[in-house]
């Protein structure tokens, strides 16, 4: 769609003898009149696209997806589709994309690489576990890396007993309001999970390496004052809290209701100053895209990314309205994550 400075596409097209087309329809038909490919990968990111009044970057994921669907409809058949990261910037568009995949019967996969990258330690949330609450602590801002943090939490939460039932509200807060909310008596579990997730970080803003024995809630309040948080209430009473703070990795913690055990890990990405090839964390996601196309099945439900897209939309809306609670009755997404383990553990 665009060729900015340092673009890699044209050189790789030449190197590998690929064909480049000016439109999505021509790419999917190979210049003909009917669908002529085995699968579609939509990556709409990094270009020069405008922001709306809420601060959302208007990447054309929905528009490109609808052009793909039009080719499917004109051809009378469809093939698997992968959409990189969240689906779109409004709930109606996100829901429409998933509905199109159901209507035309094509496998649809989407989302972040974090749920399938390495986990440190190699933790697999037990299937059908009575999970009480999930927390992710990461970095970034709204309508951006918040999505990665929410996918980190949701790939764990969706395996809980009874499965996912959707979310009832999102409340986004910044700075002092975050710590005031966490100090409430009913947030004792969230505080414990925040500390447990921080203890998995390799990038705490302190001297002396990994001072996990010194990490407390009070320490976090003092060391991470400018944190952004999404407080999410699910329709069944389950809670998800995302913290975006002054660290440089993504860390998960959840509380088991049956044993009282806190389970935690880091979703491994390149450390600051390292290149993306150091961690090689896109390989497992590419492997699942291959499965999608070759076996014509989505390895994990697109409903995960439908819901996390809604969480992002809710968080952005809450901030846009002045950090108020946003009710989300429309986000009644019911599903359960796959029983088999899909993250990379080698």
Image (cartoon, rainbow, N blue to C red):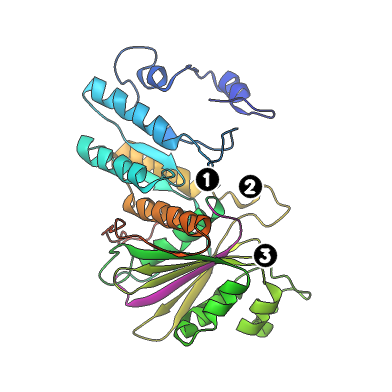
Region rendered in magenta: 128-142
28 part of magenta stretch: no
In this view, the residue farthest toward the right is 207
**Of discs 3 and 2, which sits in the foreground?**
3
Residue 124, image x and y in percent?
42, 68
Residue 124 seen in the current view = no
State the mark number for residue 276. 2
Residue 98, image x and y in percent?
30, 43
Residue 92 seen in the current view = yes
Up/down of 187 relative to 104, above or below: below
> Are there few (<14), some (14-19), or many (20+) residues within 10 Å of tag 2?
few
**Residue in view at x 70 percent, y 56 percent:** 272
Residue 245 position by quadrant = bottom right
For label 3, the SS is loop
Q: Do the residues labelled 1 and 3 touch (CB within 8 Å)?
A: no
**Residue in view at x 51 percent, y 19 percent:** 18
Residue 23, image x and y in percent?
44, 19
Q: Which of marks 2 and 1 is nearer the N terminus?
A: 1
Q: Going by the image, does 245 lie left or right of 186? A: right
Q: Earlier in the sequence, mark 1 or mark 3?
A: 1
Residue 38 position by quadrant = top left
Q: Going by the image, does 252 lie left or right of 335? A: right
| Residue closer to the observer: 1 or 32 | 1
For label 2, the SS is helix
Residue, disc 3: 246
For label 1, the SS is loop
**Residue in view at x 38 percent, y 65 percent:** 169
> Are there few (<14), some (14-19), or many (20+) residues within 10 Å of tag 1?
some
Q: How far apart are marks 3 and 2 (CA)?
A: 20 Å
Residue, disc 1: 56
**Label total for image:** 3
């Amino acid at each position: 769609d665009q060729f900015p400075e340092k673009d890699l596409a044209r050189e790789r097209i030449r190197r590998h003898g690929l064909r480049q087309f000016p439109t999505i329809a021509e790419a999917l038909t190979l210049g003909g009149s009917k669908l002529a490919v085995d699968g579609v990968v939509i990556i709409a990111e990094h270009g020069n696209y405008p922001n709306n009044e809420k601060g959302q970057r208007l990447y054309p994921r929905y528009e490109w997806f609808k052009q793909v669907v039009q080719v499917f409809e004109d051809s009378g058949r469809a093939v698997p589709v992968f959409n990189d990261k969240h689906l779109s910037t409004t709930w109606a568009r996100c829901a429409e994309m998933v509905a199109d995949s159901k209507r035309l019967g094509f496998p649809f996969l989407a989302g972040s690489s974090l749920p399938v990258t390495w986990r440190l330690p190699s933790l697999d949330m037990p299937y059908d576990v009575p999970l009480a609450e999930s927390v992710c602590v990461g970095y970034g801002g709204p309508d951006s890396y918040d999505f990665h943090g929410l996918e980190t939490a949701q790939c764990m939460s969706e395996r809980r007993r009874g499965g996912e039932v959707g979310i009832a509200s999102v409340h986004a807060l910044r700075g002092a309001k975050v710590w005031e909310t966490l100090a409430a008596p009913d947030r004792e579990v969230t505080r414990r999970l925040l500390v447990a997730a921080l203890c998995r970080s390799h990038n705490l803003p302190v001297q002396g390496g990994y001072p996990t024995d010194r990490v407390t809630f009070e320490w976090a309040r003092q060391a991470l004052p400018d944190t952004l948080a999404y407080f999410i209430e699910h329709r069944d009473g389950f809670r998800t809290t995302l913290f975006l703070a002054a660290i440089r990795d993504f860390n998960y913690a959840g509380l088991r209701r049956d044993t009282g055990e806190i389970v935690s890990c880091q979703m491994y990405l390149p450390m600051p100053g390292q290149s993306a090839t150091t961690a090689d964390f896109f390989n497992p996601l590419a492997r699942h895209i291959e499965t999608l196309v070759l076996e014509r099945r989505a390895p994990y439900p697109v409903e995960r990314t439908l819901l996390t897209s809604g969480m992002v939309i809710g968080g952005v809306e809450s901030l846009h309205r002045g950090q108020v609670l946003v009710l989300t009755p429309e986000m009644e997404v019911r599903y359960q994550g796959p029983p088999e383990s899909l993250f990379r553990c080698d």
